[in-house]
Amino acid sequence: MNLSGRVVTVDRTRIVCGGKINLVDKFLRTNWSGISKIIILVDENTGRMCLPLLKEGTTLLENAFVLEIPAGEETKTIRTVMNIWNEMLVKKADRRTMLINLGGGMVSDLGGFVAAGFKRGISYINIPTTLMGQVDASIGGKTAVNFDGIKNQVGFFHLPVAVFIFPDFLKTLPVEQVRSGLAEIIKCALIADPVLWNKVRRMSTSDLSHVGNRLHEFISKTVAYKNSVVRKDFREKGVRKILNFGHTVGHAFESFSQTCNRKPLLHGEAVALGMICESYLSHLKTGLSLEQAEGIKSFIKSIYPPYHFTNKDMPHLTGLMEHDKKNRNDLINFTLLRSLGMARINVLCNHAEINESLEYYLK
Amino acid sequence: MNLSGRVVTVDRTRIVCGGKINLVDKFLRTNWSGISKIIILVDENTGRMCLPLLKEGTTLLENAFVLEIPAGEETKTIRTVMNIWNEMLVKKADRRTMLINLGGGMVSDLGGFVAAGFKRGISYINIPTTLMGQVDASIGGKTAVNFDGIKNQVGFFHLPVAVFIFPDFLKTLPVEQVRSGLAEIIKCALIADPVLWNKVRRMSTSDLSHVGNRLHEFISKTVAYKNSVVRKDFREKGVRKILNFGHTVGHAFESFSQTCNRKPLLHGEAVALGMICESYLSHLKTGLSLEQAEGIKSFIKSIYPPYHFTNKDMPHLTGLMEHDKKNRNDLINFTLLRSLGMARINVLCNHAEINESLEYYLK
């Protein structure tokens, strides 16, 4: 699998997978006549680790204005968005300002929101620096912030003009960040690609600590698959919901974990947990065999650390699922597996079934 | 001109101009399968004056949840949007919730913003109750709130699924509100319809106090024209900018007036003032004769009360224009008149020219 500067265009988004960092410079030069100013959004980590690399390869960014925000999910709020809009007004940003989001999913979700709303929409580029960002968050134009402690409750669909995926950024990524991103690769395999699933399930924890060609292949496959889905259904009216496998339970755990006195779950860790529960729901509702569900559970448990909760937490968790964006009335809407590599959207489950699936995780 | 239930469809927006209020009920019944809940957004005035009329004609709204916000431009903030999102979460609103904005431009701008962002976009209907709302704010999917004291700095393009224009709502409207809405009719005439301009300029202040067939004709013409422009250029990349005539100076005065210790200007009052200044700029830059500019000025001054400012205020005013969404670098971008009924977009003016146009208003 050769990733060198492979280019895919999704509607108006140019996606560049692999290649050298100076591809950003080339892209900016080609579109220079439409750009009045460039603002780079980083968090404290990417400002230190990634920005120097980006600037080195992109002479046009020498005088760009850099906005740094604190790292971490708790930054992803309307308050931060408002502070950034404020800074942009002070810097006299106009409609032809280009925003570059250099960071993980938090930076691209929040930066996309900033771009979508500023003067009713300016252009932006995502340069994801985490595996999660590269295979998921940076692609597809879903922007969001958390609200009232619930993840991604408000947001907009606003496509980036370009996404640059440089696996080199992953070399310095902590193992738990690689593991988090891997969850979206696992998801892609489970809903759409049995061959990929058979490759992925052969991974072990030791594979997480060096990012090599195998991971590059997984990234490229996952990006291509996500693109193909987004292209068919940008606004998630139908088929795009397929990408939500593992996310209904996963989002609930992600929000839940932020209210506990432990280290909060990373997005992918929560989704991995969610995929175990939703595999069990798939067994109950859409014909996945118990053996297949067990296979998924044992692989995920071999990679991800266990997460502790008790039966007492279940009403809180199902309550959080009710705020999930895919619901209709009081039943909860899931994307479930019919078999390995094949999913079905819009499966409604009741609270008893969901509780059973949570117990399945604990068993 | 017969307005009875005339229907125009702009992309995905159904626009109904005139007819009985039960047309809303009919629309909701036709689309009922896609709606889980209805929320009606009103301000304290429309909650009292218009909501009973709407509910009377629309039995489906009997159990709708009503959200009331304070009237007035100072309500149009992110803070209010956040409060409404909060209420919607408490009421377990989901993606199939329909929001009905019953009110003037403030309610539809803010309500559209609420709908655009909630769970990445829910459907909404505008039922404008002011002349400004009917001829301008409710149509075209521009949503916005004010930010840092500057009007409409953040917002999104998000089309309503339907707009219902009932001129009957205008019967109880205060004269200054009719006068404010009239500015958008004058603008439409000046940029696109010399015949309409010749009818409009024959109006006098006494015509503002009774809303009759003549105004109905003006509403219908202005709505049809705005539709035709929005259909060509939803995201204001080009021709839609034509609708900005009078608005660059107008928005600055509107923001400015909110920082003074006098009653703030209504949007249309500010646009009327802006049209006087921008007619003079049109004389300087795009060939409008001084006589024509004088004709516009004397008509507008015969309808709208004078607004006092001094040369000392000019730097503040031009500063506000620099935040206008249509700017490129430090020159300020205007839509100006080439002649009566014909406009040109993207005319750049410098500060000296703008100051001269402000002095022209004072003369």
Image: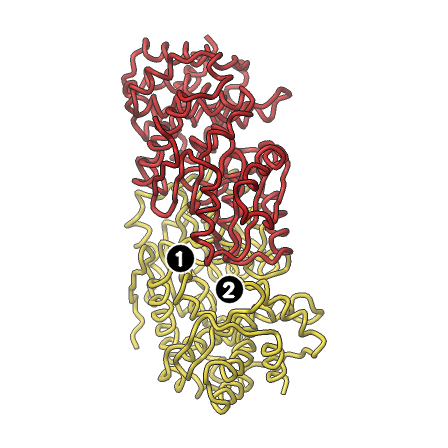
Chain colours: A yellow, B red
Residue B48, image quadrant: top right
* Residue A326 tag number: 2
Rendered location of residue B361, percent (x, y) = 45, 13
- The crowd level at tag 1 (other Cα within 10 Å; few <14, some 14-19, many 20+) is few
Rendered location of residue B188, percent (x, y) = 36, 25
Residue A24 seen = yes
Left or right of B304: which side holds A199? left
Q: Secondary structure at mark 1?
A: helix
- The crowd level at tag 2 (other Cα within 10 Å; few <14, some 14-19, many 20+) is many
Tell me if label 2 and label 1 are in contact, CB under 8 Å.
no
Residue appearing at x 46%, y 81% in the figure: A286
Pointer 2 or 1: first along the chain: 1
Residue appearing at x 29%, y 60% in the figure: A9
* Residue A56 tag number: 1
Residue appearing at x 52%, y 70% in the figure: A247
Q: Nearer the viewer, residue B284 or B46?
A: B46
Quadrant of the frame with the N terminus of chain A: bottom left
